[in-house]
Amino acid sequence: MRKQRAQMVPKSELTAAEQLKWAWTHPGLYVIGSNEFGLADPQHPGSVSGIKCAVPGLEGKLIRSAAFSKTHAAAVDSSGALFQWGTGFAGNAPHTPTCTLKDASICEVAATDDFVVVRDNKSRIRVFSGSNAPNQLGSNTDVTLSFEPRLGWRESVVSMSAGRSHIAVTTNNGHVYTAALDKDGNARGQLGHGSSTVVQPLQLHRIQSDLHFTSTACGDEHTLLLTNDGDVLGCGANDFGQLATGAYSSGKATMRELAPLPRLWKNGFLRPQDAYAVGIAASAATSYAQIVQGEARRVLAWGRGIDGQLGTGTLTHMQGVPVVIPELSDREEFDETLQARRPLGLRSLITGANHALAVCDNHSNVVLDKSGASVNASPLFGHDVVVWGSNSSGQCEPGRRHRFAEPAHPPPLFTSTSGNLENKLPLQAAPPQWIESAQLHNADPSSLPKKVLVEQIFVAGPDVTAAFLRSCK
């Protein structure tokens, strides 16, 4: 275990440039937070929270996608090998990630309470057991879900999201299909078909709508959908106001009909002509949207906020009206190329169950060029990363346990948590860069091109945050 943790604790503090260079040359999956279920270090499940660890068995691997549930996790490497681990999958004994499938077409993985869901570039959605408990798969090792109606000519699945027991997938034609993975997968109407009746699990059904959808985001029991016009619709559980219906009432606790969020815009259902949403995200019972209005860029949050998930500096039990996250909204920076100020938005917004992190789109001086380091003048700097919400297991910042009620800059993933945390340099996300495969630590250069375009990606799950290096194709 010390050996694995040491991979994330170099002896010296890292500058911004050193962070980027370290991230670009150290493939693998790096996890901070809880190890109660062996998600960070499956060789020592049940060990202390606040752990920082390189997942053993995945050293040197470029990762395409990774996902975490409460008790199990999954990752797909650059060759298409699917790895699963965690006590929910392998039991309480020490173990390492197990390769359960090899398929070069796999491009994305998601995790629910009991399952791992895999999407490939052939538009197949396959479900694998993520739990050692009996489930809907029975004696099958995996099930390929059917589409009803079938995908159209040249229609393909481009993204997916997962809740506790349901999934939603989006196609290039703007359709959304949803499926329950067990008998509770539509208990709150989260599938968007107008009812909360029990449906046949493991079958994808298209949501009936004339709108063109571009993405989905699944909470535990609610679903958000984004249209190409920038509208946001939702359905499912609304106990904490996660569907933005305003003040709570028992009659609004479950919204079975897919509909625009009533209070997302100041004038109710009507979206202003100069405003539109460009991104959505959902944690267990909290929702987020990235909004553009004129020149302004804002991030809104609503729903459960008792752990600081709303990012406003307050701890609110339920919030049915979207609020602006000040630290992520109405920001600008000076663009030296344009010699003018430009608005700042987000590159990505990532959610765990009760915490969130954002990678900002601030300017980076990294030059994307195959000729190598000679074109990058030191000091390098990447994209700012901020975290907020629950920190009960150190998933925002190991070494501390208090909740982060507003976005804060965490220390680098690759430094010790000892010493004065206030003086540590903030975490930087490594932007895309060409790296010689021979420079990738613990990797097999013979299986890779001479130079690889890589980028650092962040993901989150219940009580954990993780980062990995992905090959950009």
Image: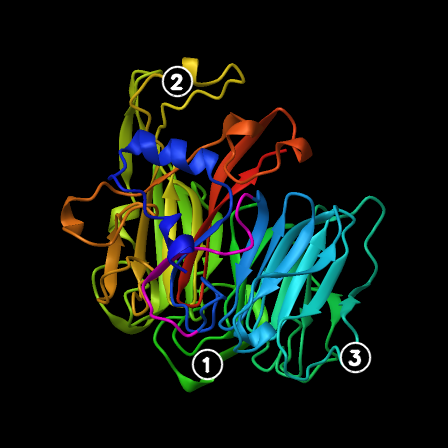
Give the x, y percent position of residue 51. 35, 62
Q: Amino acid at mark 2?
A: Asn
Query: Which residue has dot 3 on it?
Result: 139
The quadrant the C terminus occupies is top right
Residue 323 image-quadrant placement: bottom left
Query: Is residue 174 visible in this depiction of the protein?
Result: no
Figure coloring: rainbow
Residue 129 or residue 1, whichever sits in front: 1
Q: CA distance from mark 3 to mark 1?
A: 37 Å
Q: Is residue 379 above or below residue 54?
A: above
Can you tell which of label 2 and label 1 is closer to the viewer? 2
The quadrant the N terminus occupies is bottom left
User: Residue at horizontal 42%, vertical 38%?
Assistant: 23
65 to the left or right of 199: left
Secondary structure under tag 3 reads loop
Q: Over which residues does the magenta segment extend?
A: 46-60
Query: Is residue 6 visible in this depiction of the protein?
Result: yes
Residue 410 or residue 208, whichever sits in front: 410
205 to the left or right of 214: right
For the stretch drawn in magenta, what is the main secondary structure? loop
> Which class describes the residues within 10 Å of circle 1: few (<14), some (14-19), or many (20+)?
some
Q: CA distance from mark 2 to mark 3?
A: 54 Å
| N-terminal-most mark, 3 or 1 | 3
Give the x, y percent position of residue 29. 49, 51
User: Residue at horizontal 25%, vertical 51%?
Assistant: 408
Query: Which residue has dot 2 on it?
Result: 376
